[in-house]
Image: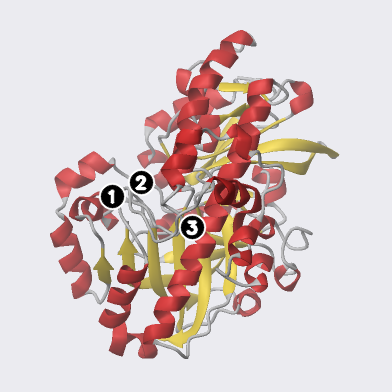
């Protein structure tokens, strides 16, 4: 190991953590050019090469690497949260109608396609422009961009580095939710832990919000798949000894490394554009059922990225390539990259739970700069595999049980619902409490689902 491997979690979470997390984190700590430490967040679980919930930063001037496995297959999968200006009492009389309208408007499921078709020129424009491109096409407002990480556009994207096959997979998938752990939820704020910061975020108990969890769909997956193969070869060419083939990587300053970064940034823009289009579709659905809803964006934050950031190491500022795989950027109060209206409170950190449990809104802390390159957990984290979950539950059973608790589920896949059963995930409250206790981020509010559109 070149640096320590550090896991942030409670004793109970560590005890229940997949042992593969320890092995994978130790492997990450052996990679060239890694700085300070390899970190695992409280929701960490076994992933491809890197653990999901893993954070690591690399210095290009010290031979640092970029790893496709360290970013993940669903590039820039992330969460955004919308205010509605409504209360639970406004939703419940039309809960079923709203659930059906959202399900009708939002294409969901494996391989789902929407009404949007991009030709080659439009595809490249989207991959360069991200959410800014989507807003320019009429799917959103300038105000949305002010509340989106990177203001909706990841610079230095290179569509030419994205294969034609990846673009073909994405041609009909813009504005779709996808499958797996992706979801759209209508949620009620059920607890507020810091009224002052919650006020800055525009949240109070009883408010109804909408969370959208989705990413770069087929395009991001194809980029990850292709570059894992390229990097496996490149690692050998550059004399990098891989303790695990899934840790395939290349020097940041190599041809393959630079080519991947250009393609990955295009993948980030695809995810930002996709969540922006989904936001527009959600607003259209609400307008039909609850036309008095006002739906400004609270914030949009990505997981599964590698970003160039400046961090202080030993009192010296260094430009690093920070990998966050299943982890969230969590800048503390005052950081210039936080939208001005939120800056004094810190960056909103959106933690997704499962369709039967709560989710959380946290805020970044100053301490997380030292602790984890300003990173925090991104969700509850899986407690069992999808295969095991499918053997344990039936989709209909999960839907009926949640309906009995007042939560309406709409999904094209009973299997998908079973695989994502609430019991397949860790206790999200335990994960959030561990992040709060470690100082990675601070708990602000809890939300609970009323409607879930599941991919």
In contact (CB < 8 Å): disc 2 and disc 1: yes
Task: Examine the rendered structure and indicate whether residue 128 appears above or below residue 363.
Answer: above
Disc 3 secondary structure class: helix
The image quadrant of residue 96 is bottom left
Residue at 16% from the left image edge and 68% from the top image edge: 400
In terms of depth relative to the viewer, which is nearer, 44 or 89?
89
Binning the other alpha carbons within 10 Å of mark 2 as few (below 14), some (14 to 19) or many (20 upward) gives many
Residue at 79% from the left image edge and 59% from the top image edge: 336
Whole-percent x and y of residue 402? Answer: 22, 68
Mark 3 / mark 2, whichever is N-terminal? 2
Disc 2 secondary structure class: loop
Q: How many marks?
A: 3
Disc 1 secondary structure class: helix
What colour scheme has been applied to the protein in the rendered image?
Answer: secondary structure
In contact (CB < 8 Å): disc 3 and disc 2: no
Which residue in the structure is indicated by mark 2?
A: 382
Mark 2 / mark 1, whichever is N-terminal? 2
Which residue in the structure is indicated by mark 3?
A: 432
Residue 302 is left or right of residue 13, and the answer is right
Residue at 64% from the left image edge and 43% from the top image edge: 372
Q: Locate the C terminus by quadrant.
A: bottom left
Residue at 48% from the left image edge and 51% from the top image edge: 215
């Amino acid at each position: 190991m070149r640096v320590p491997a550090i896991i942030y979690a409670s004793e109970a979470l560590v005890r229940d953590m997949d042992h593969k997390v320890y092995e994978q984190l130790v492997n990450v700590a052996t990679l060239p050019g890694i700085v300070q430490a390899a970190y695992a967040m409280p929701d960490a679980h076994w992933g491809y090469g890197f653990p999901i919930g893993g954070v690591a930063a690399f210095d290009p001037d010290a031979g640092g690497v970029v790893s496709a496995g360290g970013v993940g297959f669903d590039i820039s999968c992330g969460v955004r949260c919308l205010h509605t200006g409504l209360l639970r009492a406004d939703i419940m009389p039309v809960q079923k109608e709203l659930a059906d309208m959202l399900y009708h408007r939002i294409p969901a499921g494996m391989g789902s396609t929407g009404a949007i078709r991009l030709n080659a020129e439009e595809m490249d424009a989207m991959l360069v422009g991200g959410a800014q491109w989507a807003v320019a096409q009429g799917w959103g407002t300038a105000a949305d961009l002010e509340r989106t990480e990177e203001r909706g556009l990841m610079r230095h994207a290179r569509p030419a580095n994205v294969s034609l096959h990846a673009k073909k997979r994405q041609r009909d998938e813009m504005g779709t939710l996808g499958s797996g752990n992706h979801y759209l939820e209508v949620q009620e704020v059920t607890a507020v832990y810091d009224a002052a910061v919650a006020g800055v975020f525009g949240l109070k108990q009883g408010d109804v919000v909408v969370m959208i969890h989705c990413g770069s769909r087929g395009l991001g997956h194809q980029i990850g798949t292709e570059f894992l193969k390229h990097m496996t070869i490149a690692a050998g060419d550059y004399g990098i000894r891989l303790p695990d083939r899934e840790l395939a990587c290349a020097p940041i300053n190599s041809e393959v490394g630079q080519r991947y970064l250009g393609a990955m940034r295009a993948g980030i823009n695809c995810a930002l554009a996709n969540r922006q289009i989904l936001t527009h579709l959600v607003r259209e659905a609400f307008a039909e059922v609850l036309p008095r809803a006002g739906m400004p964006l609270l914030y949009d934050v990505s997981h599964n990225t590698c970003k160039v950031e400046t961090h202080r190491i030993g009192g010296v500022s260094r430009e690093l390539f920070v990998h966050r795989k299943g982890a969230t950027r969590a800048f503390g109060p005052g950081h210039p990259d936080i939208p001005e209206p939120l800056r004094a409170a810190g960056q909103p950190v959106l933690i997704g739970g499962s369709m039967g449990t709560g989710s959380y809104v946290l805020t970044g802390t100053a301490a997380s700069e030292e602790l984890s390159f300003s990173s925090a957990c991104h969700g509850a984290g899986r407690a069992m595999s999808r295969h095991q979950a499918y053997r344990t539950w039936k989709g209909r059973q999960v839907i009926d049980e949640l309906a009995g608790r007042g939560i309406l589920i709409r999904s094209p896949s009973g299997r998908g619902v079973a695989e994502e059963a609430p019991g397949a995930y860790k206790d999200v409250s335990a994960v959030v409490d561990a992040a709060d206790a470690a100082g990675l981020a601070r708990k602000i509010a809890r939300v609970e689902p009323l409607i879930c559109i599941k991919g």
